[in-house]
Image (cartoon, rainbow, N blue to C red):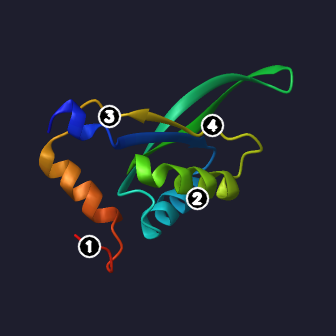
Amino acid sequence: MTAADASELLAVFTTVATREQADALARGAVAQRLAACVQVEPIHSTYRWQGEVVHEPELRLVFKTNQANYPSLEAWLLASHPYDVPAVFALPVAAASSGYAAWLAASMNHPTDAA
């Protein structure tokens, strides 16, 4: 797949505090076909919140989706997220294997959508 072909693919990131929160967001996004896949990984975050510097463990979620699904995914994440001000941001995919890109697109198509 060329860089131009991959331009529709996105990696969307957010973080949560618990495994239960991560699992709920991951399952919900995949079940609703807003993302084809969600990866969850433990991280440690340092940030300023309400005037204090905080350092704590979190879980980072990476939603594999496309440009067309981003507005719906973002709206759903903001409505479903447990944080007051969740980080929700997308990075474009520069290149991807054609087979993976095809699987990603097919995974987000609804059964009644054209293949």
Where does label 4 land, which residue? 87
| CB atoms of marks 3 and 2 within 8 Å | no
Mark 1 vs mark 4: in front: 1
Q: Amino acid at mark 4?
A: Ala
Residue 22 lies, in percent from the top left, at 54, 53
Answer few, some or many: residues within 10 Å of disc 1's Cα (few below 14, many 20 plus, some between 14 and 19). Answer: few
| CA–CA distance in space, label 3 to label 1 | 24 Å
| Type of amino acid at the residue the image marks with label 2 | Glu
Residue at point 26%, 73% (across, down): 114
| Amino acid identity at mark 1 | Ala
C-alpha distance separating marks 1 and 2: 34 Å
Circle 1 residue: 114
**Measuring 33% from the left and 80% from the top, which residue is drawn there?**
112
Answer whether labels 1 and 2 touch (C-beta < 8 Å). no
The kind of secondary structure element at disc 2 is: helix
Q: Does 71 appear above or below 58?
A: below
Residue 93 is marked as 3
Q: In front of the other: label 1 or label 2?
A: 1
69 vs 86, left or right, is left
> Sequence-wise, which precedes: disc 2 or disc 4?
2
The residue furthest bottom is 112
Cα distance in 3D space between marks 3 and 2: 28 Å
State how far apart marks 4 and 3 are (Cα).
Answer: 19 Å
